[in-house]
């Protein structure tokens, strides 16, 4: 054994043939060795994963790099410890019969007659790098804050290495697909004017322009549309976006998206482009190609699943029951809308669990939850049956397609509340069908142009103010008058979302490309000419010089990769994420800056309110 810090610099020993080091210090990666290399002299480099000593003159060292682990047999006592950086040279051979490790792809091999060179020593790591079985999967039990404080160590774990390399493969597939489809990669700026898109901007003070600020982009939206004005025709970018909003499992301040825009296309062509890229990436990672992606209208998604992000891996579709109770004497069912679904085998749920579900529906905004167990001959058992006629009981059983042993769950309320609460309840009690694919994509189309009204009465865009209204609904916008606000909520848009397993992967739309229509939409949003000029003047002015019809889309890469890898948070597929509180335990960010730097920027800090 030699130590790189104290090694003899004389001529190497002639007792052993030395490998060709044209590839650097190593000739092979640890996990790449196969039986084809048996008998070859090799050098491998990496971290000592484990060391096991057998007597005074025999040691087994497991050496690890990102490709895997190889067992090395050393015929001497060695002073190497966990995570020492080492180079081991020896001869590849088959392990003795009965000693193979089926859990390693190199489990039939070992390197013998080894020479160990310590390239760098290491202190004991603050936590184990070996995952354990948690919930049927290999995961670490180390708390996340510790892992992020020592992220450079956490990244050595096999799972994290796999996640990052999977992410890189997804990005590579996206680029290949986009280039095959004729898209040009264009990089848009990171320092831009503040044009809020629904979330708070991160702002950057300008030293050269005191009291002025740049904003970090929430998306490349404006610049990719300007690229269409500039004749780029088909643009794409693996874009970094930043939004100052509360964090959660699927949200970070910084995130990456596949961003694309194309001229002279319809929304159908954009959806085809995205299908190609997403299915290519899925096939590369999963080894199989999902079926063609179906579409569902926003209205149907709300009506059938209670959400615009439907999880299609299982049924439990919401059923309309309102007409059954048109003449009911049961006051609880005297409501605008009654809907429900049947939970197969749900009669076995305990009363405590049903009470828990009832309280959840109340916390979600419902007045309560009506429930019935289905018994022999499809009879119903529940506290509300005494207020219901036999015809009503038989009718809801038939409408919900119930069978003996099922649990019927009903909500009576305003239609929006019934849909929303039952949609959440469906996710609470539903489970994906084991026989179905674990990846279910669906397009949701024909979104409303406006999702509601602000406190001052202005309509709120469901996507962004550049979204094209549906051609069939343009007349509503053009003839809209005061006092007809409700009409605006019926206007559809040429917007579309891609959903996977109940998670929104991305959104897109056909864009408004004429100045007249864009001004009309801005005016409906309550924006004055001065406000439009201040916030979007450069874009509106650009449209005066000839803008091709265009459309685009943006897909969240972090979320997509985390779903493919069955990770619970996107932090597991990001190399250096922030915690849920927005801090970085590794660097200590956010931090204060020096008074001198503040003076240069013309900033005087104030006490927080």
Image (cartoon, rainbow, N blue to C red):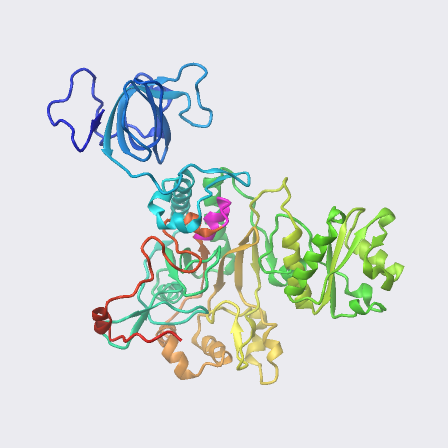
Q: Is residue 122 left or right of residue 439?
A: left
Q: Is residue 117 above or below residue 443?
A: above
Observer-nearest of 381 and 192: 381
Q: Quadrant of the rendered structure where residue 475 is?
A: bottom right
Q: In this rendered view, identify the residue nearer to me: 407 or 316.
A: 407
Residue 541 percent location from the top left of the image: 36, 76
| Left or right for 185, reference 121 | right
Which of the 4 image quarters holds residue 334?
Answer: bottom right
263, above or below 543, in the image: above
* Relative image position of residue 576 (x, y in whole percent): 36, 51
Q: Is residue 430 visible?
A: yes
> Looking at the rendering, in which quadrant would you find the N terminus?
top left
Q: Position of residue 259 (x, y in %)?
A: 41, 57
**At 37% across and 58% down in the image, what residue appears?**
240
Residue 561 on the magenta span: yes
- The structure residue drawn at horizontal position 27% and vertical position 25%, both measured from the top left corner, is 78
Q: Is residue 578 magenta?
A: no
Front-most of residues 166 and 299: 166
| Residue 42 can be seen in this image | no
In the depicted structure, whether residue 52 falls above or below residue 173: above
**Closer to the camera in the image, 60 or 394:** 60
Q: Which residues are magenta?
A: 558-568
């Amino acid at each position: 054994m030699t130590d790189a810090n104290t090694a003899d610099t004389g001529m190497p020993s002639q007792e052993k043939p030395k490998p060709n080091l044209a590839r650097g210090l190593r000739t092979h990666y640890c996990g790449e060795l196969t039986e084809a290399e048996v008998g070859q002299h090799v050098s491998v480099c990496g971290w000592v994963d484990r060391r096991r000593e057998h007597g005074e003159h025999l040691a087994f060292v497991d050496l690890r790099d990102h490709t895997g682990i190889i067992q090395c047999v050393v015929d001497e006592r060695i002073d190497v410890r966990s995570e020492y950086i080492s180079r081991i040279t020896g001869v590849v051979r088959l392990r003795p019969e009965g000693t193979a490790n089926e859990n390693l792809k190199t489990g039939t091999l070992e390197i013998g007659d080894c020479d160990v060179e310590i390239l760098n020593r290491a202190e004991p790591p603050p936590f184990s790098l070996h995952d354990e079985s948690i919930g049927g999967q290999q995961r670490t039990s180390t708390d996340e804050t510790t892992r992020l404080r020592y992220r450079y160590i956490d990244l050595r774990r096999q799972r994290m290495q796999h996640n990052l390399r999977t992410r890189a493969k997804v990005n590579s597939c996206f680029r290949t697909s986009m280039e095959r489809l004729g898209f040009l990669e264009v990089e848009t700026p990171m320092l831009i004017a503040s044009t809020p898109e629904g979330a708070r901007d991160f702002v950057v003070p300008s030293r050269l322009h005191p009291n002025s600020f740049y904003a970090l982009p929430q998306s490349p939206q404006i610049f990719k549309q300007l690229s269409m004005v500039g004749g780029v025709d088909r643009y794409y970018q693996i874009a970094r976006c930043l939004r100052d909003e509360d964090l959660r499992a699927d949200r970070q301040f910084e995130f990456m998206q596949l961003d694309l825009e194309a001229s002279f296309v319809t929304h159908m062509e954009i959806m085809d482009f995205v299908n190609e890229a997403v299915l290519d990436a899925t096939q590369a990672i999963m080894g199989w190609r999902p079926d063609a992606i179906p579409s569902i209208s926003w209205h149907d998604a709300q009506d059938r699943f209670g959400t615009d992000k439907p999880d299609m891996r299982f049924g439990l579709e919401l059923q309309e029951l309102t007409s059954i109770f048109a003449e009911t004497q049961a006051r609880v069912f005297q409501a605008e809308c009654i809907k429900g679904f049947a939970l197969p085998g749900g009669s076995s749920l305990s009363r405590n669990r049903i009470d828990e579900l009832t309280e959840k529906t109340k916390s979600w905004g419902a007045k309560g939850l009506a429930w019935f167990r289905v018994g022999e001959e499809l009879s119903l058992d529940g506290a509300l049956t005494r207020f219901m006629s036999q015809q009503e009981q038989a009718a809801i059983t038939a409408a919900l397609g119930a069978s003996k042993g099922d649990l019927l769950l009903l909500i009576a309320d305003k239609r929006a509340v019934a849909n929303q609460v039952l949609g959440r309840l469906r996710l609470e009690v539903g489970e994906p069908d084991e026989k179905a694919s674990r990846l279910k994509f669906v397009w949701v189309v024909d979104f409303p142009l406006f999702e509601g009204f602000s406190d001052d009465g202005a309509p709120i865009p469901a996507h962004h103010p550049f979204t094209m209204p549906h051609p069939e609904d343009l007349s509503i916008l053009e003839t809209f008058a005061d006092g007809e606000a409700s009409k605006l909520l019926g206007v559809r848009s040429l917007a579309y979302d891609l959903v996977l397993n109940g998670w929104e992967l991305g959104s897109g739309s056909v864009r408004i490309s004429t100045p007249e229509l864009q001004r009309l939409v801005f005016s409906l949003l309550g924006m004055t000419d001065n406000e439009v000029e201040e916030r979007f003047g450069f874009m509106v002015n650009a449209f005066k010089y000839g803008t091709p019809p265009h459309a685009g889309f943006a897909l969240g890469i972090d979320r997509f990769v985390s779903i493919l890898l069955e990770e619970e948070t996107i932090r597991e597929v990001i190399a250096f994420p922030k915690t849920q509180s927005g801090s970085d335990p590794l660097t200590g960010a956010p931090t204060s800056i020096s008074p001198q730097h503040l003076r240069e920027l013309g900033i005087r800090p104030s006490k927080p309110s």
